[in-house]
Image (spheres, grey):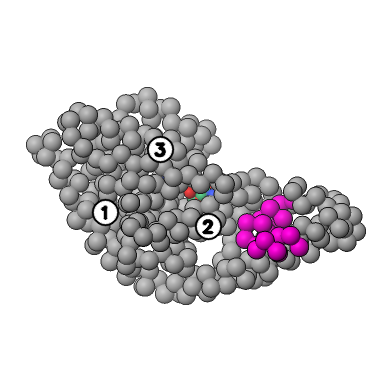
């Protein structure tokens, strides 16, 4: 199977991105017979971020995170969308001409962003068409994404299908979204969905003292230390459960129910668990961040490897237009 997913260079990956997207996609890439295309969607990033220095730093930290989690760039494909911009944007133009205007006007993500952002640019509007180009350019079959992206993948299928129908040929592969329902919503320190934009995230790559500070911000109720507590209502316990072993979870649960165990104790346990669970990953992340030239090298190799695939797709569609 050909797996493909893109990640915007909009910030450093947080615990929600890691448990919800990075780890599941790495697992998928390790299955025999799968080829994974993993790219940094830096052209999409421009819809919300215009500063080159920030885009570059975010690109490095996103790439370092994937490498730290063991993405095998030799077996797979690892690249920046901007380095293949001629293919992505050319294909986007062709797809634009097969995209009904109301499909874009009714897209949930566009409507959400148009309400929230002050910069409602045309890039935001045509964002799903660039995403469709990203996907069909490499004949991708499976697209692991969060629930918020479901509609974008459906739009990709619709657009690709209208091209295939028009020329009565399988020019493009119709992709399918793979959405992991269970780990869909990792809570942030305030209990809402963990998100960069809500500033409620836990950054597992921080130095220990700063990480502990973030964990201490987790909101709790006012139950006294000596009283029993309901673990199922508590954010620290919810986060702990996502990474701890069965016996560790059972032990913490018993502590909550028994009383005499404070939220501060639970937070310290969560902190220790994160340090232990991500020990190697934290080291590797720091290593790559202090060796950006290694990241650059791996990306450049990937960019060379994907180019002929992109060229072949462009040639296929151009042939239909007699271009
Ligand atoms: P953010 O909301 O922080 O801006 P993105 O929208 O860039 O995150 O999401 C990148 C990936 O991480 C997507 O696949 C998304 O589904 C996943 N993701 C983001 N936040 C969470 C979360 N709180 N729980 C689970 N998965 C998440
Ligand atoms: N829109 C996706 C997000 O914000 C990022 C993305 C761009 C993407 N192109 C893609 C995801 C192609 C999957 C496939 O998360």
Classify residue 101 as left or right of residue 112: left
Magenta residues?
A: 234-251
Q: Earlier in the sequence, mark 1 or mark 3?
A: 1
Q: Residues within 10 Å of mark 1 (few under 14, many from 20)?
A: some
Q: Which mark is residue 84?
A: 1
Instruction: Kindly identify the residue that appears in the image at 34 percent across and 37 percent down.
Output: 156
Q: Earlier in the sequence, mark 1 or mark 2?
A: 2
Does the Cβ of the disc 2 residue fall within 8 Å of ligand 1?
A: no
Q: Which residue is mark 2?
A: 18
Q: Which residue is mark 3?
A: 152
**Circle 3/circle 2 CB separation < 8 Å:** no
Instruction: Kindly identify the residue that appears in the image at 53 percent across and 57 percent down.
Output: 18
Instruction: Kindly identify the residue that appears in the image at 32 percent across and 67 percent down.
Output: 74
Does the Cβ of the disc 3 residue fall within 8 Å of ligand 2?
A: yes
Residue situated in front as seen by the camera: 192 or 207: 192
Instruction: Kindly identify the residue that appears in the image at 36 percent across and 51 percent down.
Output: 4
Q: Is residue 195 above or below residue 282?
A: above
Q: Give the x, y percent position of residue 162.
A: 26, 30
Q: Residues within 10 Å of mark 3 (few under 14, many from 20)?
A: many
**Circle 1/circle 2 CB separation < 8 Å:** no
In space, the residues marked 1 and 3 are separated at their CA atoms by 21 Å
Secondary structure under tag 3 reads: helix
């Amino acid at each position: 199977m050909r797996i493909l997913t893109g990640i915007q260079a909009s910030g450093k990956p947080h615990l929600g991105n890691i448990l919800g997207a990075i780890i599941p996609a790495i697992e998928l890439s390790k299955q025999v017979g799968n080829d994974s295309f993993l790219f940094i969607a830096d052209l999409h990033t421009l819809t919300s971020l215009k500063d080159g220095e920030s885009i570059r730093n975010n690109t490095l930290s996103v790439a370092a995170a994937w490498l730290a989690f063991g993405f095998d760039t030799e077996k797979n494909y690892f690249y920046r969308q901007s380095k293949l911009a001629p293919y992505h944007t050319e294909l986007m133009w062709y797809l634009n001409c097969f995209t009904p205007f109301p499909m874009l006007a009714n897209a949930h993500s566009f409507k959400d962003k148009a309400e929230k952002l002050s910069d409602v640019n045309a890039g935001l509007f045509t964002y799903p068409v660039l995403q469709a180009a990203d996907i069909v350019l490499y004949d991708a079959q499976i697209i692991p994404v969060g629930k918020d992206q479901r509609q974008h993948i459906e739009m990709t299928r619709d657009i690709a299908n209208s091209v295939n129908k028009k020329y009565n040929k399988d020019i493009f592969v119709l992709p399918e979204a793979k959405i992991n329902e269970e780990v869909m919503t990792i809570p942030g320190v305030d209990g809402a969905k963990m998100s960069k934009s809500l500033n409620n995230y836990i950054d597992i790559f921080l130095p220990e003292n700063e990480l502990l500070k973030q964990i201490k911000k987790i909101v709790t109720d006012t139950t006294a230390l000596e009283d029993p507590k309901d673990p199922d209502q508590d954010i620290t316990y919810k986060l702990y459960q996502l990474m701890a072993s069965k016996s560790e979870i059972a032990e913490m649960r018993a502590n909550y129910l028994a009383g005499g165990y404070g939220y501060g104790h639970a937070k310290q346990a969560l902190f220790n668990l994160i340090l232990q669970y991500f020990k190697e990953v934290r080291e590797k992340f720091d290593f790559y961040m202090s060796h950006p030239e290694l990241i650059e090298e791996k990306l450049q190799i990937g960019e060379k490897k994907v180019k002929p695939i992109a060229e072949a797709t462009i040639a296929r569609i151009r042939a239909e237009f007699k271009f």
